[in-house]
Image (tube, rainbow, N blue to C red):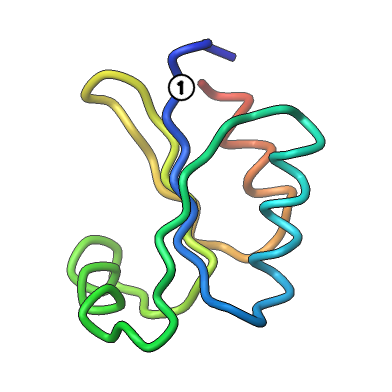
Amino acid sequence: MAKDLSVVVWAKQGCSYCGDVKNYLEEKEIPYQTIDVTEHDDRRDILEAKYGVRHVPVVEIGQGNKFEAVTEVGIEYLEAALNRQ
């Protein structure tokens, strides 16, 4: 996995799946930024425009101008995407 990897977690307060994603990244010592969509429908609008979903978590992973989004719920999807980097 590249050291200059950028990881962004779109999440909301009280979301157990979002917490699972953040815990996983912390355990693997992968730095990430969070975009909180709690009470921010405009941020959900962005997710819908970019990926066709309004749910969270969505994890954006990339470097340079190449990135991918994990929109499926489950750590196995996140792991697979990280392994492709």
User: As drawn, is 71 to the left or to the right of 76?
Assistant: left
Question: For residue 44, which quarter of the picture?
Answer: bottom left
Residue at screen point 73% across, 75% down? 16
Please identify the residue farthest to the right as the structure is shown: 27
Depth check, front residue: 64 or 26: 26
Numbered disc 1: secondary structure: loop
Question: For residue 64, which quarter of the picture?
Answer: top left
Residue corresponding to mark 1? 5
Instruction: Give the x, y percent position of residue 19.
Output: 71, 64
Vertical placement of 14 versus 1: above or below?
A: below
Instruction: Give the x, y percent position of residue 85.
Output: 51, 21
Instruction: Give the x, y percent position of residue 47.
Output: 29, 68
Amino acid type at image mark 1? Leu
Residue at screen point 27% across, 73% down? 43
User: As drawn, is 79 to the left or to the right of 33?
Assistant: right
Residue at screen point 21% across, 69% down? 46
**Disc count in the image?**
1
Vertical placement of 79 versus 29: above or below?
A: below
In the picture, which quadrant includes the N terminus? top right
User: As drawn, is 74 to the left or to the right of 38?
Assistant: right
Vertical placement of 38 versus 74: above or below?
A: below
Vertical placement of 74 versus 39: above or below?
A: above
